[in-house]
Amino acid sequence: MPRRRKLPPGAGISKEISGTGKTFFRARLSKVFLGEGSKKKAFPTEGEAFAWVFDEQAKLAEAKKSEAVGDAWELSLDALSEVKVALAKLNGRASLLDAAEAWLKFYGSTEETKTVQEAIEVLRLEMDAERLGTRHRREVKAKLLLYWGSWIQRVEKVVDGKKVIEELEMKGYLSKNVNELTRTDVDAMLAKPAGKNAEKGPPSLSLREKRKRYSRILINFCIDRRWIHQDRNPLGIVRRKKKHATDREAAEIYIFSPLEVAQLLWSAQQNVPEALGGLVLKLFSGMRNPEMESVRWRVIQDGSIFLKAAFTKNLRTRPVTTEPVLVAWLDILSKDKDPRDLVFTYLPKRKDREAAWQIALRKIADGAGWEQWPQNGMRHCFCSYHVALYKDTARTAEEAGNSEAVIKAKYLNAVRQSDCKQFWRLYPAVVEALVQMPAEKVYEPEQEDEPEPDPKED
């Protein structure tokens, strides 16, 4: 009969009977065995109890050995355990040092970090240095602060049998470091309710796409500055949605009617005459704001206006044809003007010409009785009427400094031919006649129309 191994000090095994009358063996490990605390465990056979005690003794010996090694290397037991697992995963393909250097190269190479708000501020300064469009710079900053900032979450609850709307202020992500942004943060930002105070409900698909587009500007800038590693882009792979002219998600553009254009021109004449030059350039040539604000009288000659590359969107010089209706307005405005003067002269001492234009535009709209101003309304207006006049999308694209694909998608067949003819005939005298024309008399259904005079009568 084999000799039974002697139990180590602090360990014991006892034979016991359970409440159902079954025999089992309980193994106990005291503080003497473990060094601190105690353990006990029940087994169906004495052999299993002995095996467990000696397994625990072996584990304890290994832990003490590792602890000694850890003390020598100043590493914790958890760190030593991670080292073992890491070496097992590498399986001889590379050393642990090589793995650490690879991680630092591809994942830990950011030189510094910024909060989201700080990154937005630096981005704005960079855009200022690059002399990008004032409106674009202002919009990028404002929208990024809106999208990533705090918002009000409205939650419907039932209190005492009544529905109550509780408003919770959600913190947002402006104070979070950009290299700590996750895909979960991006998803939450994209799902934010629309509106400055989240009053417009869930965001539409087009708004989500817009948030992605503006956020991509910020994240790419942070990657370029090495504040975010390129392999940790929280946006992931952003797939652009292919849009078509018949895209149901695309918002309808607003195109001014000829009468509305006449009202704007008349309002500018009466209320802000210094802005009239800029208004006619926008309406009848489709210039963008920075382009219009840069035009001086001396560049208007021989039936065209040459826009300098520094002010165009694609940084290329572009000639703009002066249509007869535009020539008529500019002839009136150019009298006694110095060729070096700007065409748009409202608030000449204001350095921010975009702000001056927006102030003038608000006064023009107020004078015309408009409460809201459709964004890019004048550019939509020009492109639509120009392509309707010439039936040539390439020509319109060249005049507007746009792509032919955009002209086809947004402006082709957007206006009636009758409106097109009237738009290009909005000369100064025609505008005055249109806005001062009395409203047409409206007859009740039961009234008869007035008889027309006999053409034979004098």
Image (cartoon, grey):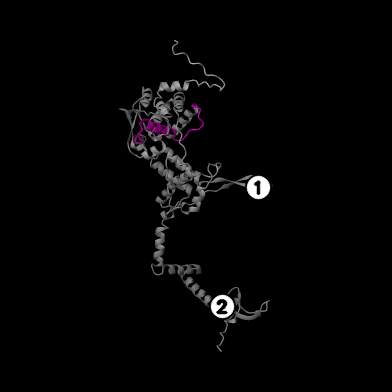
The residue tagged 2 is 52
Task: Report, in whole angstroms, how far the alpha carbon at label 1 lies from the one at label 2.
Answer: 57 Å
Is 124 placed left or right of 150 in the picture? left
Tell me: residue 36, above or below residue 305: below
Q: Is residue 386 magenta?
A: yes
Q: Is residue 173 visible?
A: no
Residue 141: x and y in percent read 46, 42
Q: Nearer the viewer, residue 442 or 262?
A: 442
At label 1, the amino acid type is Val
Q: Is residue 64 above or below residue 165?
A: below
Q: Which residue is mark 1?
A: 158
Q: Nearer the viewer, residue 227 or 456?
A: 456
Q: Is residue 5 left or right of residue 349?
A: right
Which structural element holds mark 1?
strand
Q: Is residue 223 on the magenta stretch?
A: no
Residue 135 location, x and y as percent?
43, 38
Q: Main secondary structure of the magenta part?
A: helix
> Which residue: 51% across, 46% down?
149
Residue 38 figure quarter: bottom right
| Extreme residue toward the bottom, this view | 1
Q: Which amino acid type is shown beneath numbered disc 2?
A: Trp
Instruction: Report the magenta residues as a range.
Output: 367-395
Q: Residues within 10 Å of mark 2 (few under 14, many from 20)?
A: some
Disc 1 to disc 2: CB gap under 8 Å: no
Number of disc labels = 2
Where's residue 112, x and y in %? 43, 53
Q: Is residue 108 toward the left or the right of residue 43 in the image?
A: left
- Element type at marker 2? helix
- Can you say which quadrant of the picture contains the C terminus? top left
